[in-house]
């Protein structure tokens, strides 16, 4: 089972991913988390990605497809995976289709988290993330401790107002067309109202997958 979590930055994909993954019994792959870990570790991948990420631009498709290809060929994803933050461009949708086809797999559904830009700006302005385990929080001050691992909460550089504006415009230009791509290729696309409590949104997403 391969499920794509789709939506604007700040729509709640990173919050929902572990909850949905636990309910469905599959692991998650968050390309943003993989890239931030690579930056922290100082790898070639991290050095290549950093400038794009700091500006709120997308990292080149070839880099992302390399990460996906690697992850999908690992035993931990043999029974499925929730993709968080990928697919973000039409070439990524094409590339993922080739990778899954070669492995005898397919994307089973796209969960599209729907939310207005005003709400995104409000959420991201108050967001911090754990610098160790990447858990996102809303309304928790930088430098406080992560509930899950005790790591330090920090603000992401790309959650500054200018980068947020750029990320929303990148979403409109490059990412939104991916939904049409999946609809056209016959993949189930479920639009989920992403406003409400975390539990309500999880229940809506699971309900949409079951129907
Ligand atoms: P996220 O944590 O999903 O908000 O991603 C943070 C940043 O990582 C994005 O703004 C991009 O710069 C980069 N990134 C993550 N996933 C992708 C992707 N699928 N395609 C291109 N860039 C990505």
Image (cartoon, helix red, strand yellow):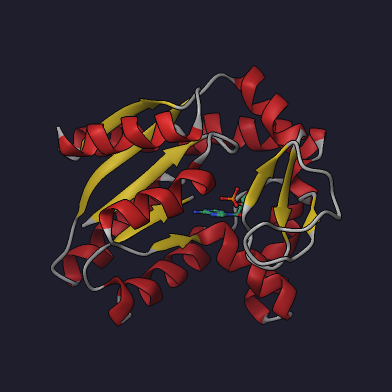
Q: Position of residue 201 (x, y in %)?
A: 41, 31
Residue drawn 64% across the image and 49% down it: 136
9 relative to 190 in the view: left or right? right
Q: Which quadrant holds the C terminus?
A: top left
Looking at the picture, tell me which residue is in the foreground, 13 or 99.
13
Residue drawn 62% across the image and 61% down it: 148
Residue 124 drawn above or below residue 83: above
Residue at the far right: name it. Answer: 143
167 relative to 95 in the view: left or right? right
Residue drawn 24% across the image and 32% down it: 208
Give the number of marks. 0
Residue drawn 41% across the image and 61% down it: 28
Is residue 78 in view from this perspective? Answer: yes
Q: Position of residue 64 (x, y in %)?
A: 49, 63
Q: Which quadrant holds the N terminus?
A: bottom left
Q: Position of residue 45 (x, y in %)?
A: 63, 75
Residue 144 drawn above or below residue 68: above
Q: Position of residue 55 (x, y in %)?
A: 75, 48
65 relative to 124 in the view: left or right? left
Q: Kindly indicate the quadrant of the structure image that contains residue 130.
A: bottom right
Residue 59 drawn above or below residue 79: above
Q: Kindly indicate the quadrant of the structure image that contains residue 144.
A: bottom right
């Amino acid at each position: 089972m391969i499920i794509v979590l789709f939506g604007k930055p700040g729509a709640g994909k990173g919050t929902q991913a572990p909850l949905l993954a636990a309910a469905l019994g599959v692991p998650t792959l968050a390309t943003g988390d993989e890239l931030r870990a690579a930056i922290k570790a100082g790898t070639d991948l991290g050095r290549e990605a950093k400038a794009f990420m700091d500006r709120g631009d997308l990292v080149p498709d070839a880099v992302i497809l390399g990460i996906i290809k690697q992850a999908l060929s690992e035993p931990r994803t043999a029974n499925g995976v929730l993709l968080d933050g990928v697919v973000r461009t039409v070439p990524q949708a094409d590339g993922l289709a080739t990778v899954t086809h070669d492995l005898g797999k397919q994307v089973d559904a796209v969960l599209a988290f729907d939310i207005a830009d005003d709400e995104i700006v409000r959420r991201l302005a108050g967001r911090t993330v754990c610098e160790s385990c990447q858990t996102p929080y809303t309304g928790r001050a930088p430098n406080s401790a992560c509930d899950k691992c005790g790591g330090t909460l920090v603000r992401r550089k790309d959650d500054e107002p200018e980068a947020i504006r750029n990320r929303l415009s990148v979403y409109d230009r490059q990412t939104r067309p991916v939904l049409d791509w999946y609809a056209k290729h016959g993949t189930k696309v479920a639009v989920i109202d992403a406003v409400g409590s975390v539990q309500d949104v999880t229940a809506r997403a699971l309900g949409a997958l079951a129907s």
